[in-house]
Image (tube, helix red, strand yellow):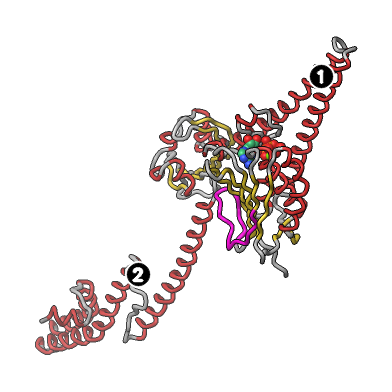
Amino acid sequence: MLKKFSKNWGFERDNAFVNKVLLLCFPNVLVFTILAAYRQIEPIIAVAVLAGVALFNTILLFPLSCELQKIKRYVAKLSSGEVIEGETLKMSEKETKELVNAINNMHKFWAEKNDVIKAKSLSDAAVLDSLPDPLMVIDHEGMVIGANLSARQALGEEITHKKIDEIFNSHNFLNAVSRVLNKESSAETLVFYANEPLASKFYAHIKLLPWQKLNQTQVVIAIYDLTKSLKIEKMQSDFVANASHELRTPLSVITSFVETLRTSAKDDEQAREQFLEIIAEQADYMSNLIEKLLSLSRIELIQDEEPGERVDVRDLVYDIKKTFVIKAKERHMTIKVFADKDLVNAKGDEQQVRQVLQNLIDNAVKYGDENSQITIRIKNVDKIPTSKTIKTSEGRAVAIAVNNKGAKIAPENLARLTERFYRLQEHKDKKIKGTGLGLAIIKHIIIRHRGNITVNSTGDNGTTFTVYLPVFVKN
Ligand SMILES: Nc1ncnc2c1ncn2[C@@H]1O[C@H](COP(=O)(O)OP(=O)(O)OP(=O)(O)O)[C@@H](O)[C@H]1O
Ligand SMILES: [Mg+2]
């Protein structure tokens, strides 16, 4: 019964409360004991008065004590984060009411602060996760205590709680890390090679964090994988090597024929004519190659500037077709154009779109079967096919498909056609003239136009290159 009563009041067995009541009664007990001892008061009355005082103190202190206990439990719940939102304490005593209000206000203030900190740390984590390169924080023992998404993806989800020397085995790198951990230097940068977990060349930036938690050093390590930039460097040097090689070959032909003309064939009329023709041919090839290389670098320079002219593709195709009639006739080929009646205009740089179509039709004439037909279809389409490597424009587009008959191109070769200087062996063997740069130029022009280019090759239907250009929309 007493238990139930205490529970209703929110009162738990509390020795401190009993002690307080006894302490308050103590002066009275002392006074009444002395009075009773000197017979100034009847002992029975003294006991009765003392009982009355004890009851009075209990009645006075009990509600306050109950509410203080409730507050104690409430604060304990607050500090352990167990308080449900909206949960408040109702107090009847003035002092406790004010105390609870103050506690609630403080709780609200810190809860709001906490939300701001949580949001900030979430956004900080999101920013770190969006970095393309691995970033880690290690503690004074070299233990990884934080890693961004890129680090977790590259080095494994379990890198946190691993020691840095369990992740990388490069001595140079680990020495640099320990120099910073030992505060011999505040920051270190170095290039190092790792065999595991990634066989790569890395650039690392190791820095002591300016703030320290509980006097414990923390170090941030940013790592950049240099393999990608090495690849780009290699591509650039390959390109220079290829270009020099392509130029050196005709140049050496020209030099050797000039030498022959000067010496052994000096007086040979017939040989002279023949050699001069070869020299002119090689010189033509060289100027074509130089023109294409310059064109490629010009296009690369303005790759990010999206063109906005209105281009009438149908007119352009008919115009270009005229310039290829003679060349096609030499190979007994015909060129047919089919265009949608309601064809819309494309958005682009007319000069560059002309270059694209000229290159495609030139290829069809050069590499298509003799006595066959080249078909060019121009259509409106709802969207440009997406691509992993090209950022395409959204919405409707104009598609220009150039088809020529001929042997099927194997898929592995098909994928390489837009590489600079890449040419199919069979065409090199047949000595069909070309630099191998036409399709690379087309690709760059298409990227600038936010369009796309696809290629399809089958045994029956030959090879079809389709170029997609976004439609021109009047503002
Ligand atoms: N329509 C096609 N049919 C079959 N093979 C093609 C076709 N178009 C291109 N190719 C192959 O792709 C290679 C690369 O073409 P690209 O247009 O880039 O260079 P090219 O024609 O050799 O030289 P250039 O365009 O400078 O005259 C060609 O050499 C050829 O082997
Ligand atoms: Mg070509």
Q: Residue furthest top?
A: 264
Q: Quadrant of the N terminus?
A: bottom left
Q: In this rendering, would 453 be left or right of 264?
A: left
| Residue closest to the eye, 398 or 221 | 398
Q: Is residue 113 visible?
A: yes
Q: Give the quarter the ligand 2 occupies.
A: top right
Please name the residue that numbered disc 1 is placed on.
Answer: 255
Q: Secondary structure at mark 1?
A: helix
| Residue at 19% over, 82% down | 8
Instruction: Tell me which corner region of the image, top left, top right, bottom left or bottom right, holds residue 12.
Output: bottom left
Residue 353 pos. (x, y %): 72, 52
The residue stretch that appears in magenta? 377-394
Q: Is residue 418 visible?
A: no
Q: In this rendering, would 169 be left or right of 339?
A: left
Please name the residue that numbered disc 2 is placed on.
Answer: 78
Task: Say which amino acid is labelled 1.
Answer: Thr
Residue 92's mark?
none
Instruction: Say above or below: 299 vs 198.
Output: below
Do the CB atoms of the residues marked 2 and 1 lie less than 8 Å apart? no
Instruction: Say above or below: 328 vs 53.
Output: above
Q: Quadrant of the C terminus?
A: bottom right
Q: Secondary structure at mark 2?
A: helix
